[in-house]
Image (tube, rainbow, N blue to C red):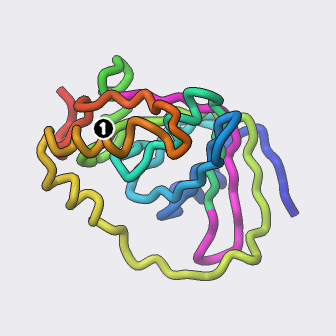
Amino acid sequence: MAKQFAAIDPDHQAFIEKQPVFFVGTAAAEGRVNVSPKGMDSLRVLGPNRVMWLNVTGSGNETAVHLLQLPRMTLMFCAFEGAPLILRLYGTARMVQPDQTEWPDLYAQFLPLPAARQIYLMDVDLVQTSCGMAVPLMGFQAGRETLNDVHRTLGEEQLSDYQQSKNTRSIDGFPTGLLIGKMPIAETRPS
């Protein structure tokens, strides 16, 4: 049975922080709905009504486009081990890019990841839990390093070229607002 809460409580936070993967759902007023899996150590609970997650360069940039048009976001976490549970965070979000004044303080809360491109700050207005009894039991083996390995081999020019071709427009043709050439490509903290 689904239960709704006005905020993330300590049990919710513990569950969220234990999950090795979460899913992000966004949509603009028109075009396709996007649901993306996210891994790595990329999410932080900042308080009872705020979370953030670090996004790295990938094959698309749908979340950025959707938030520019309509700032709704849903994050979903599923228990693939242990007791069944699905937890969803509903709210609004905005993008912070490496050239913005907030970036250094926010980025410092993560281990540095190569080709980090955005941090999404989400204000949570509803937490919903549901049973998750149909979610299969699956054991976590390990995180994948493939994306980080690829990013470590790219130089600044190659990364910029890739972002220009893959990350500046959505699959529906909308501009993403991504600042090309502004991402940290090495595993170092911004100065």
Q: Which residue is mark 1?
A: 164
- Closest to the observer: 118 or 112? 118
Q: Which residue sits at x=65%, y=80%?
A: 136
**Range of residues picked out in magenta:** 78-97
Q: Which residue sits at x=28%, y=31%?
A: 180
Q: Classify 10 Å Cα crowding around label 1: few (below 14), some (14-19), many (20 and above).
A: some
Whether 180 is drawn above or below 32: the answer is above
Tell me which amino acid carries mark 1. Gln
Residue 63 drawn at (x, y percent): 53, 41
Q: Which residue sits at x=78%, y=68%?
A: 131
Q: Classify the position of the N terminus by image quarter.
A: bottom right
Left or right of residue 9: residue 1: right
Is 141 colored magenta in this rendering?
no
Q: How many marks?
A: 1
Q: Which residue sits at x=55%, y=39%?
A: 51
| Magenta span: chief secondary structure | strand
